């Protein structure tokens, strides 16, 4: 079974803190993704990576950065957390190609106070 | 850019009745369409996909989806709903990007199955 794990299920941070969310997949997938999910807005893509050290902006990259130093690991960084970044964050991975589905981690519920 | 639309925020159905969750798409070229389900406080789970071939696609948990090119639709269906099918359902389309490919999701449809 494909496994995508995220470093925390719940996280509470203060405004201005630097926040790291980590995602690890065990299926040798080329692609990895970070989404945020908010009620009524569905899933919105923040950033994705199609290879080690390669990244591409998604629909809402402002206020976020990412790092992919190893194929299995993809980190999302909030340089200076703000209250409007309170959300559910979902990581996913997939093989390259249009025919391949994405596999999702359990999500991290981040609250910024 | 490719897109999908889910016109219903919520669908209510009685247990044992057939269910349909609607999705329409807008793509240039051949569509690569997916359905996912999300149970409360969980990540998304893949249900099924349409790549090419038969217009009726079968997936997990007894779900199927019908691809209709003329109506640009990809509706999710199940012949007999269960209370345990109550969840949030997302339709998505895969598209090429500069270096790879990514999914674009609809806003989701909350399915509520009642006794």
Image (cartoon, coloured by chain):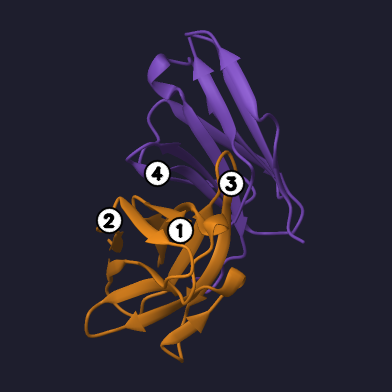
Chain colours: A purple, B orange
Tag on residue B102?
1
Q: Residues within 10 Å of mark 1 (few under 14, many from 20)?
A: many
Q: Are marks 1 and 4 on the same chain?
A: no
Q: Compute the Cα span from label 1 to label 4.
A: 11 Å
Count of marks, rendered view: 4
The mark that comes first in sequence, 3 or 1, is 3
Residues B81 and A102: in front is B81
Write down the residue under mark 3: B43
Task: Identify the image quadrant of residue A59.
Answer: top left
Q: Residues within 10 Å of mark 3 (few under 14, many from 20)?
A: many
Q: Which residue is mark 2?
A: B8
* Residue A97 visible, this angle: no
Circles 1 and 4: CB distance less than 8 Å?
A: no
| Callout 2–callout 4 Cβ contact below 8 Å | no
Q: Are marks 3 and 1 in contact (CB under 8 Å)?
A: no
- The N terminus of chain B: image quadrant: bottom left
Kindly identify the residue that appears in the image at 38 percent across and 56 percent down. B104
* Mark 2–mark 1 distance (CA, rounded to whole Å): 24 Å
Q: Residue B20 in the image: state x and y as whole percent.
A: 37, 69
């Amino acid at each position: 079974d494909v496994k995508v794990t995220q470093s925390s299920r719940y996280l509470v941070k203060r405004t201005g803190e630097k926040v790291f969310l980590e995602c690890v997949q065990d299926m040798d997938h080329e692609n990895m993704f970070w989404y945020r999910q908010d009620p009524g807005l569905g899933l919105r893509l923040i950033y994705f990576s199609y290879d080690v050290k390669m990244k591409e902006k998604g629909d809402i990259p402002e206020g976020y950065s990412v790092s992919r130093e190893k194929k299995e690991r993809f980190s999302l960084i909030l340089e200076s957390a703000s209250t409007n970044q309170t959300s559910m964050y979902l990581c996913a991975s997939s093989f390259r190609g249009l025919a391949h589905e994405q596999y999702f981690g359990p999500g991290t519920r981040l609250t910024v106070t | 850019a490719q897109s999908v639309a889910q016109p219903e925020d919520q669908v209510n159905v009685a247990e044992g009745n057939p269910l349909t969750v609607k999705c329409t798409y807008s793509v240039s070229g051949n569509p690569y369409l997916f359905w996912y389900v999300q149970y409360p406080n969980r990540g998304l789970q893949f249900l099924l996909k349409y790549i090419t071939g038969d217009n009726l696609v079968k997936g997990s948990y007894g779900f199927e989806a019908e691809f209709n090119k003329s109506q640009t639709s990809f509706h999710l269906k199940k012949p007999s709903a269960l209370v345990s099918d109550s969840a949030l359902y997302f339709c998505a389309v895969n598209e090429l990007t500069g270096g790879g490919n990514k999914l674009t999701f609809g806003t989701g449809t909350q399915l509520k199955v009642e006794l």
